[in-house]
Image (cartoon, rainbow, N blue to C red):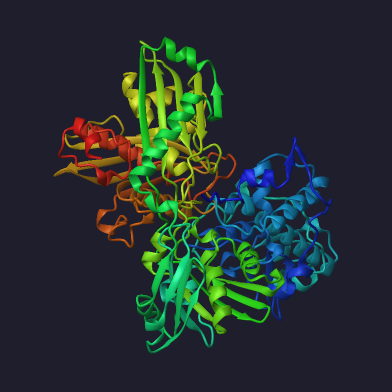
Amino acid sequence: MSKLGKWSRRGFIAGGVVVGGGLVIGVALRQGDRRGDVISSVTTDGDELLNIWVKINEAGEITAIVPHSEMGQGAQTALAQMLADEMDAKWSDVGFEEAPATDDYANWALGKGFILGDAAVPEVLVPTVDGAFYQVAKAMRLQITGGSASVRTTGVHGMRVAGAAAREMLIKAAAGKWQVAESELTASESVISHTASGRTATYAELASAAALFTPSPTPKLKDVADFKIMGKYVQRHDIPSKVDGSAQFGIDAQVPGMQYAAIKAAPVFGSAVASVDSSKAEQRAGVTQVVNLGNAVAVVASGYWLAEQALKDVDVKWTATSNDRVNTESLREQFRKDITDAATNGTSESDVELGNYAEAFAAAERVLEATYEVPFLAHACMEPMNATASVNGDMCEVWVGAQNPMGFRYEVAAALELDPENVTVHQHFMGGGFGRRSIADSAIQAAMIAREVGTPVKLIWSRAEDMQHDIYRPGVASKFRAAVAADGQVLAWDNVYHEKHEPAEAPVIPYAIAAQHIHYTDSPTHLPFGPWRSVDHSQHGFFTEAFFDEVAEAAGEDPYQLRRKLLADKPRHLKVLDLAAEKAGWGEPVAQGKGRGISLQESFGSLVAQVVDVTLTDGKIGVDRVVCAVDAGFAVSPDGLVAQMESGISYGLSAALYGEINVENGAVQQTAFHDYPVVRMQDSPVIETHILNSGETIGGAGEPGTPGIAPALANAIYQATGTRVRKLPVSQYDFNYRVEEQEELI
């Protein structure tokens, strides 16, 4: 079993940032001005570095240096917006580049955002607090893009501050040049103006002088009312290159003298190479070498197709393990048994204990029980795992699309027993990440193969390899009980599940139910699991919101109205829920064979309500429309937020309808999109997204759209068919059968 995601809130706490409510650091260091540490790696002739986040060249081009990866989510554009607005720069002057994979760009803001949130820090302590989080982020080797954290942490605590500090430095430079008070100057559209004298100077003209000042860690930030770029629809800077084909993804890397590698890993996790007969493969034209990595075998050739075909001729014998007997049904039986035993024996660990739930169940008129299950899921990125590596003596270079390039540098260095300073990671765009590209396995393999062969090597995983050797979303079972009084009042909520990962609050419900017991246990498997879009929210969103509809029916309540009743003290939740219901036409009659379902999910600092319309045709479910209401506090990039809601919904819908990783004799069976299907254009529903700007703390965008689609879909299916979908995917069900027969079928 693998539990990944050390970049989480709990990871920072465990890293020693917060103990007993106070900051704890090994060495009391202020973050300080680190321009001297990075200037050689981020500037060329003619560039002036105002702080580690922004540079200006002689042509007036302003570049935001962004420490987050771009995998289609638009984070780099949104972060550049935040910097540009605080800087009072002209948007057409602003571009971005990805920060190098160095310690100087460790995600200190991630920890600060997760731990402190909006907590006020005395101005005098800000440099020390920021420095503490910087030291911890360095120690944890974090330059992570994940947890929907880019805008709400780095943007809020890094980019806005950097932009405002740069603006102040440019104003100081103009004030010194003209010998006037800073208060007499204004900044707008990349120009500093002195109204009284009519003098103006561009940022490019002032950059050299401005760079002589030390950037303030506590510049004055704008009020929302003064935003000119944040909150506006702007052109994304990554789109043109993706349209004209000039964008460089990891798989596009080209290195002189490069060869290609195809790889076959042990079919059962935990197994290893017992023997290899590569003689037939080595006789093929173009084949250079067959490399044994211990748990995998790679063929290196002059072309990828040659390597892939030659791999079929390699005869590999694998060691036997106890995992060889594992299959999908044995895993499901294990999960059910472990949660039942934990609940019965009192060995579970609690998330929530509220009120006297034992007494509430004893007094109930009706007790509902249901077990929900989700399967293991692959990430299924459009771009399969790949990396290009070159090793020369004690020096290594890697070309890859990574969600944690700094972490990759350290992991590759450890695998090759090199000094991390001798490893360079060249970052590229990613054709999908979803947490998968926070794992360095393909980069490590490429580096090890390149060292063995002695030439640069591009390693590309086949689609089958990608599916069968993923770091999966775990399969999970969750058992519920609810107590309902004779008058329909919901008295108690009990939930036991297994595999607690991140975020810790994922199984917690927002509803005002007086007695609650939410608890968990472990159920280890040989399949590795790690971050998958929305992490634990992906399963608990389905579990809790689908079961809530069962509770509503038992209470004799409309599911939307019962949610409203139990959210009376949460006006922000109510506004999102009401907006989705209003836009979807909740309460309007639904025709025979059609269904409408609702869900509400709080995740990654954002609130998302979804209403799904479905139609039953010839025993098959078609998804017609999804209405989504989202409150992310403030939409820094509205078009980006809409795009991410659509993306998250589509991703979650694919999983809910079709997603399933099956195991037979210990090995994953899925190999490609024919047996791991995703929603295609012709089956994609109309998605309507409505944004609420509550003014609360900025939340995430990349992940919050995913958790709510499965329960809203399941609830709609129930209205259309009378069948409760308690197990995913929906494709398991044959809705031509009577309701009472469904459990037997699946």
Residue 199: in sight, yes or no?
no
Residue 224: percent from the left, percent from the top? 61, 46
| Residue depicted at x 49% and y 64% | 236
Q: Nearer the viewer, residue 39 or 140?
A: 140
Picture layout, residue 38 above or below residue 628: below
Q: Nearer the viewer, residue 698 or 731?
A: 731
| Residue depicted at x 29% and y 50% | 685
Residue 371: in sight, yes or no?
yes
Residue 463: percent from the left, percent from the top? 37, 66
Q: Number of callouts in the render?
A: 0
- Compared across the picture, whether 63 is left or right of 601 comes to right
| Residue depicted at x 43% and y 49% | 645
| Residue depicted at x 31% and y 45% | 729
Q: Nearer the viewer, residue 590 or 192?
A: 590
Residue 108: percent from the left, percent from the top? 69, 54
- Report which quarter residue 410 is drawn in: bottom right
Q: Nearer the viewer, residue 299 or 397?
A: 299
Residue 155: percent from the left, percent from the top? 62, 54
- Report which quarter residue 540 is drawn in: top left
Picture layout, residue 315 above or below residue 144: below
> If the image is split into quadrants, where does the C terminus sit?
top left
- Compared across the picture, whether 63 is left or right of 460 comes to right
